[in-house]
Image (cartoon, coloured by chain):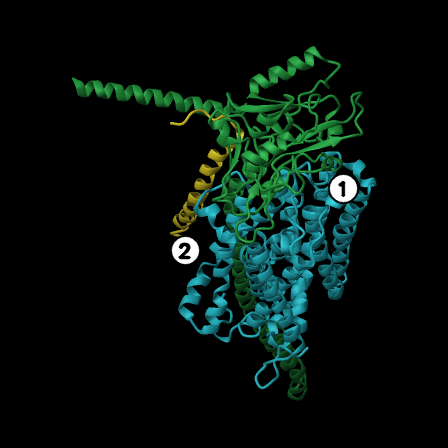
Chain colours: A cyan, B green, C yellow
């Protein structure tokens, strides 16, 4: 693909730009429909199904897949794994864009988006886990923004300000991990209040723990997955250490993901046992649960291990992709597929094409922003003036 | 005199305050709450309901809701199972398949006004309020429209005005809060022609319900729905058949909604309190390891260099001494010629060892 | 002084509100304390 080489003197009508442009135009049209016709005009939401794709995908999946930010910065800055240093900036950038887009998506989903600050400035519903999620996501978005600022500051040449922010790295990292632990787990805890609606195989008092642990898995896998994509499409932007560390990162993060998946598998089984839900495993939902547990937890756990033992980076990359899909399936299960399982099929939810359209639009906006930043700012290479400055 | 008297009264007041405080605290520590003592509710008895939909009409009227698609006199709508909508706070359903000698039974659906409302617990702007009188009210002026209340409600009561672009509200029965505050009856209760609905203090309603079961055990199942479901509700139900047969879930349990999230919420401050300690600890350990590693490396390098130097010197001296000795020996035993030849390989050997040590 | 608490929801609302206030204060405090603790560290 050549669309990301410098566009000076070249046509702007590259395949990427054309497709992205069409999606953005569609997104803008759907946005107008959403805010003139209301949720009824654009979604299949109902009184039985108040949350759909925009919560299940844009919020739950978006936040889980943006976990690479806190996982990587914790590994490098707190656990002292400096050999993964080149993974930090891409991960922070993805996390920042991810959270920014989550907040953007919420503006489509809630009824009166301009009131989104109300829980903090008007009336605090402190008993709600959504309050906790909201507070943490808002704060973490700010933390990610500050963690990201050295990049544009280096790009613009503001040395002083850049060095000041870098000094805050430890504080920001600790703060980021605290906030991430809280809201990643609380997204799962949101469903604790509805034991009568979520299928018993997925409902568990351990839901917050499951969401937190699987966010680590998602974060590790996303870093591997992304570095694969970055290497493919932005190879010319990578400096030597980034290209060289790529495989080290895949092996190290793959090993970590494998072991975390193993732990995750154990606590999932314990959850079934603690709730005595074994008998559900023979039902249709049980079959689907086993697909998730064996196909998307146990299997990638094993493949990661084989990949790490054989130093097979290709296998690790494919496993990372598979694991990411698994996390998406898990979030869909909890928020949509296994939610409202007691209702007759006529009352069940399936997203309207416009809901999918908005979600695709938002992901596309993210890709455009990522491309814009990566092709201009020091993400995949170190700025020559700040080498070894960390 | 008057000043000291005022002071004395102040002290009394303070004493009174502290008593109230300690009372509140003791109420908190026992952690068993029974709801507002004089709160009201409604008892619905399905053995009396004739499915006339007058309650629906009454509700629609007093709440000034939009006119229904089909008139309230039209009973054909009962052929289908309905639920609350943004235009109907309450609906009546007919249950044909019940095992009841007098034919079908009817059920009435509306907000149950939980003693511990899940919607209120879930709302992140506190738009819902469990009022002292018993009604769970909704404040549209703060509602963001996240619809988490609808996720949380086990009875699937709150509805949403999805069709409104900019001012959608959550819609649900308010137990006619404005009316009951003025001493009037809720719209549905007032319009019920058969006394299927009884309005009163929840305490009294429970007594009435028990009395009916006691007096007519063959008429009712021995259960008051809402006495304990989800921690108890202000609406109470009596039924001639098991409640699941009239569309009411019997698997909700008795755990009040706030308790379901209490565990997760209590984890929050622990994470905030201990994570910084734990993470900074890990950071310190990794930093210290790094420091030790680099110090060890440095020392290893210097000692290695020194050792190599010393060894090389010693060997050189040894080799020189050896060479000297052999020289002497050679002088003693051989002639001048033989000495010259023997000196060469020995010197070479000494050179070799020296370079090996250095590398 | 308000009357006694009658619902678990009300109780949790009050305690959680205070908890959140403590949390915010604690984050600032522990950062400050860390600086105090390591203020005389060498290097």
* Chain under disc 2: C
Mark yes or no: residue B262 visible.
no
Q: Are marks 2 and 1 in contact (CB under 8 Å)?
A: no
Q: Residue at x 67, y 37 (%)?
A: A195
Residue A274 lies in quadrant:
top right
Find numbered disc 2 in the image and state the secondary structure of the residue it sits on.
loop
State the residue at coordinates (54%, 58%). Answer: A77
- The location of residue B274, given as percent across then percent down, is 52, 43
Q: Quadrant of the C terminus of chain C?
A: bottom left
Q: Secondary structure at mark 1?
A: loop
> In the figure, residue B353 lies in which quadrant?
bottom right
How dense is the environment of label 2, judged by Cα within 10 Å: few (below 14), some, or many (20 and up)? few
Frontmost of labels 2 and 1 is: 1
- How far apart marks 2 and 1 lie (CA) works out to 69 Å
Q: The disc numbered 1 marks a residue on which chain?
A: A
From this view, report whether residue A45 is shown above or below residue A226.
above
Name the spot of residue B340 as percent of width and height, x first: 65, 87
Q: Which residue is mark 1?
A: A344
Q: How many marks?
A: 2
Q: Quadrant of residue A255?
A: bottom right
Viewer-nearest residue: A389 or A95: A95
Q: Which quadrant of the rendered structure holds the N terminus of chain C?
A: top left
The location of residue B142, given as percent across then percent down, is 48, 44
**Extreme residue toward the right, this view:** A282
Confirm whether residue A321 shows in the render: yes
Residue on which disc 2 sits = C42
Question: Is B156 placed above or below A232 here?
Answer: above
Residue A83 location in percent, x, y? 60, 63
The verdict on a common chain for dots 2 and 1 is no
């Amino acid at each position: 693909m050549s669309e990301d080489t410098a566009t000076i003197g070249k046509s702007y009508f590259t395949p990427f730009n054309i497709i992205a442009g069409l999606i953005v135009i569609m997104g803008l049209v759907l946005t107008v429909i959403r805010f003139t016709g209301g949720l009824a005009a654009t979604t299949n939401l109902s009184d039985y199904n108040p949350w759909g794709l925009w919560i299940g995908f844009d919020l739950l999946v978006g936040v889980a897949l943006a976990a690479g930010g806190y996982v990587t910065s914790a590994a490098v800055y707190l656990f002292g794994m400096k050999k993964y240093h080149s993974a930090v900036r891409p991960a922070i950038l993805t996390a920042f864009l991810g959270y920014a887009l989550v907040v953007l998506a919420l503006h489509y989903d809630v009824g009166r988006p301009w009131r989104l600050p109300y829980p903090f400035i008007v009336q605090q519903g402190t008993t709600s886990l959504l309050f906790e999620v909201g507070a943490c996501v808002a704060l973490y978005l700010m933390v990610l923004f500050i963690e990201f600022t050295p990049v544009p500051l280096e790009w613009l040449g503001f040395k002083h300000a850049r060095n000041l922010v870098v000094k805050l790295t430890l504080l920001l990292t600790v703060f980021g991990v605290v906030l991430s632990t809280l809201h990643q787990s609380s997204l799962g805890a949101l469903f604790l209040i509805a034991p009568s609606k979520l299928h018993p195989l997925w409902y568990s008092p351990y839901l917050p723990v499951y969401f937190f642990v699987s966010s680590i898995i998602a974060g590790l896998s996303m870093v591997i997955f992304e570095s694969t994509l970055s290497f493919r499409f932005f190879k010319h932007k990578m400096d030597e250490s980034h290209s060289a560390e790529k495989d080290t990162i895949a092996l190290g993060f793959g090993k970590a993901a494998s072991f975390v998946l193993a732990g995750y598998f154990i606590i999932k089984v314990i959850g079934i046992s603690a709730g005595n839900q074994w008998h559900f495993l023979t039902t249709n939902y049980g079959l689907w649960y086993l697909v998730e547990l064996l196909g998307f937890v146990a299997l990638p756990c094993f493949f990661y291990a084989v990949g790490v033992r054989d130093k097979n980076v290709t296998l690790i990359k494919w496993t990372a992709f598979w694991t990411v899909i698994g996390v998406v399936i898990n979030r869909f299960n909890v928020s949509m597929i296994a939610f409202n399982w007691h209702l007759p099929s006529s009352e069940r939810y399936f997203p309207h094409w416009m809901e999918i359209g908005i979600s695709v639009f938002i992901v596309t906006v993210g890709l455009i922003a990522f491309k814009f930043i990566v092709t201009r700012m020091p993400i995949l290479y170190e700025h020559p003036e700040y080498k070894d400055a960390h | 005199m008057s000043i000291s008297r005022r002071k004395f009264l102040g002290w009394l007041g303070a004493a009174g305050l502290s008593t109230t405080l300690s009372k509140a605290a003791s109420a908190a520590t026992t952690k068993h709450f029974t709801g507002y003592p004089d709160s009201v509710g409604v008892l619905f008895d399905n053995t009396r309901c004739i499915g006339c939909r007058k309650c629906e009409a009454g509700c629609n009227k007093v709440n000034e809701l939009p006119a229904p698609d089909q008139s309230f006199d039209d009973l054909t709508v009962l052929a289908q199972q309905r639920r609350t909508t943004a235009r109907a706070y309450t609906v009546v359903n007919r249950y044909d398949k019940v095992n009841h000698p007098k034919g079908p039974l009817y059920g009435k659906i509306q907000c149950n006004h939980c003693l511990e409302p899940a919607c209120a617990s879930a709302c992140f702007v506190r738009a819902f309020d469990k009022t002292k009188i018993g009604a769970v009210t909704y404040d549209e002026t703060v509602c963001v429209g996240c619809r988490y209340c609808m996720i949380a409600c086990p009875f699937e009561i709150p509805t949403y005005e999805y069709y409104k672009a900019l001012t959608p509200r959550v819609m649900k029965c308010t137990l006619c809060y404005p009316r009951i505050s003025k001493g009037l009856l809720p719209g549905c209760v007032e319009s019920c022609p058969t006394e299927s609905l009884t309005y009163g203090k929840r305490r009294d309603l429970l007594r009435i319900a028990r009395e009916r079961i006691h007096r007519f055990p063959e008429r009712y199942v021995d259960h008051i729905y809402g006495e304990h479901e989800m921690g108890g509700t202000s609406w109470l139900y009596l039924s001639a058949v098991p409640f699941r047969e009239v569309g009411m879930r019997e698997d909700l349990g008795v755990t009040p909604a706030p308790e379901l999230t209490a565990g997760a919420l209590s984890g929050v401050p622990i994470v905030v309190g201990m994570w910084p300690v734990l993470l900074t600890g890990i950071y310190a350990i990794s930093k210290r390891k790094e420091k030790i590693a680099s110090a060890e490396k440095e020392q290893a390098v210097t000692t290695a260099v020194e050792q190599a130097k010393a060894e090389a010197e010693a060997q050189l001296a040894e080799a020189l001494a050896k060479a000297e000795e052999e020289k002497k020996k050679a002088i003693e035993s051989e002639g001048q010629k033989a000495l010259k030849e023997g000196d060469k390989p020995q010197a070479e050997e000494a050179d070799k060892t020296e370079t090996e040590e250095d590398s | 002084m308000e009357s006694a608490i009658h619902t678990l929801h009300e109780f949790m609302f009050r305690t959680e509100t205070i908890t959140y206030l403590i949390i915010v204060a604690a984050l600032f405090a522990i950062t400050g304390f860390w600086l105090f603790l390591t203020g005389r560290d060498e290097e």
